[in-house]
Amino acid sequence: MATTMLDPAHLETTPVSFRRILVTTDFSAQAHMALVDAVRLAMLFAGEIFVLHALPPMDVRYGDVLGMETRQAAMAAAQTAMAREVESIRDLARIPCMTRVEEGPLDLQVEQMVRSHHIDLVVAGSRGAQGLDKLLFGSSAESLIRRAPCPVLIVGPNARRVDSLQSILFAADLELGSLRAAQYAAALAKTMQATLTVMHVVNRVGPPQRELRKDLEERLRHLLPRDAAMYFKAHVQVDHGLPAPRILRAANLGGAELILTGCRHNGAFGDHAAWRTLSKLIHDAACPVLVVNGRLGEGTPA
């Protein structure tokens, strides 16, 4: 991975606010887990929940009575399932909640809702099926992450329930795209008073030479604001090998309750190797994975 020297003066330790949380659901058990986690986060941040179900587009032509009846029946069934899903989570009665059933591609519906309702965070479940190339509803995870102009929290099939965020692992690639993710990592650590591990994995068989390791550790420290020590505990870690297994090992050993990573601005995970790494993290992690898209200054924490 290419490296870029970063100046901590570019970053500020500011609070993060996930006040408006959008959750996608297909009413499956995995989607239910994602909604439960979203509700917990909304309670932690005194926020509100928006729940979205996207029906697949139906090609109904003018005068097609049977097609219209089928569409109406599908919409009614989805609305009934939505009401049942919301009622099944007792804590939802304690926070503001709005539900939407829309027809159309999930990623487009998410993008529209994020912009129209000023959403701070999208939460989605992943079954881990089909090589992890797809999220719920069959929509590409890559497309959802690329289109959502805010962070996306993905709850994988092995993720534990979110009870707190006292330990956060930030997997940094040291590209410019890491800057916005770094700011979210520091902001979350400050807000939750969590321990933050900033980690970089050198994709090679043998350990990096001493000078390279020292250089990488320094670059990781530069991802942290200068005043970070005033608000939370942080340490840096450089490892070597295949990124996903090493990140997962560090997360398990450190008891991470959240893995956070950035993605490149020029097409989310256009690098297939990076996408495979993210897919492995989503599938195997014992905690949710927060993906932050974009560059510093684009919708940064406030």
Image: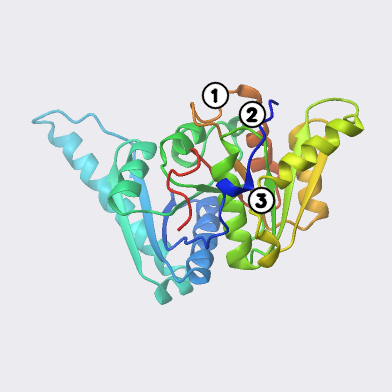
Q: Position of residue 42 (x, y in %)?
A: 47, 66
Q: Is residue 228 left or right of residue 67?
A: right
Q: Mark yes or no: residue 155 visible.
A: no
Looking at the image, residue 91 lies above or below residue 41: below
Question: Which residue is more in the foreground, 21 or 133?
Answer: 21
Picture quarter with the C terminus: bottom left
Looking at the image, residue 261 lies above or below residue 234: above
How far apart marks 3 and 2 lie (CA) works out to: 23 Å
Image quarter of residue 167: bottom right
Which structural element holds mark 3?
loop
Q: Which mark is residue 16?
A: none
Q: Position of residue 78 (x, y in %)?
A: 33, 51
Disc tally is 3
Q: Which mark is residue 224?
A: 3
Mark positioned earlier in the residue sequence (3 or 2):
3
Q: Residues within 10 Å of mark 2 (few under 14, many from 20)?
A: some
Q: Residue at 88% of width from left, 32% of height from top?
A: 211
Q: Mark yes or no: residue 9 visible.
A: yes
Q: Position of residue 30 (x, y in %)?
A: 55, 51
Q: Residue at 23% of width from left, 40% of height from top?
A: 70
Q: Residue at 69% of width from left, 29% of height from top?
A: 3
- Mark 3 or 2: in front is 3
Which structural element holds mark 1?
loop
Q: Are marks 1 and 2 in contact (CB under 8 Å)?
A: yes
Q: Residue at 85% of width from left, 35% of height from top?
A: 213
Question: Which residue is more in the foreground, 82 or 98?
Answer: 98
Q: Which mark is residue 270?
A: 1
Q: Which mark is residue 274?
A: 2
Which amino acid, mark 3? Leu
Which amino acid, mark 2? Ala
